[in-house]
Amino acid sequence: MSRKCCATKFALVVGMDEGGPAAHLLFWSKPAMPRNGHDRLACDADLSRRIERTIAPIVRELGFVIVRVRVFGVDRPRLQIMVERHDGGSITVDDCADISRAVSAALIVDDPIAGSYTLEVSSPGIDRPLVRPEDFERFAGSEAKLTTKRVIDGQKRFRGLLLGLDGGAVRIVVDGTERAIAIDDIAQAKLVLIDASLRKGRKPVK
């Protein structure tokens, strides 16, 4: 379903998945400004980190923590902010709206993205990404999928039971064999929906 707020240019898009509600809040900012062909906004890691540093204290004050910040696109950039409750509870549509309004005010001042862009605030959903080293410790005992930057023993995709971290390596049991994959070699990682993953995901964030 969708809901529009006439006071400002907001559009709420709310979906349901097997793991519960997944809410998204989209915000359209000022009209687009001309861009050149050398624009490097797409998946700009440095820009994402700058934005995260700006908004993290605001999100934390509201009782949430940032899971991931990503910037996509050139002609109409999209800023995705994924959050979860600090106490491990569910996120509502109103929570997403509150976060969006709060971070929008800060981003207007900081102005990290020139011209128009779309702001999306969402909950992780059933396939929560594993972004930071502590995520692999927190979700030890859960099923996960890993994609590596390079071929390791003939493959780049691994699925199995997370065991946590050992130094700079992620320990995971794949097809009954324990593997250690350097965290620097991991391009993407996310949870796989099973009961254990859902139970882990509801625990408070430390």
Image (cartoon, rainbow, N blue to C red):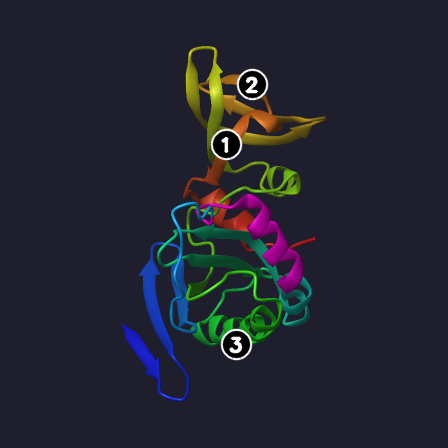
Distance from Cα at disc 3 to Cα at disc 1: 31 Å
Query: Seen from this angle, which residue lies furthest left?
Result: 1
The residue under the point 39% across, 68% down is 26
**Residue at image mark 3:** 101
Q: Secondary structure at mark 2?
A: strand
Magenta residues span 41-55
SS for callout 1: strand
Q: Amino acid at mark 2?
A: Arg
Between 92 and 194, the one nearer to me in the picture: 92
Q: Which residue in the structure is indicated by mark 1?
A: 187
The Cα atoms of the two marked residues, 2 and 1, are separated by 16 Å
* Residue 94 placement (x, y as % from top left): 47, 77
Quick check: can you spot residue 204? no
Residue to which mark 2 is pinned: 179
Q: Position of residue 144 (x, y in %)?
A: 47, 35
Above/below status of 39 relative to 173:
below
For the residues bearing labels 2 and 3, Cβ distance under 8 angstroms: no
Residue 101 at x, y = what percent? 52, 76
Q: Amino acid at mark 3?
A: Arg
Who comes first in sequence, dot 2 or dot 1? 2
How many other residues sit within 10 Å of disc 2, few (<14), some (14-19) or many (≥20)? some
Is there any visible trace of residue 92 in the rendered image?
Answer: yes
Mark closest to the chain's N terminus, 2 or 3:
3
Q: Amino acid at mark 1?
A: Ala
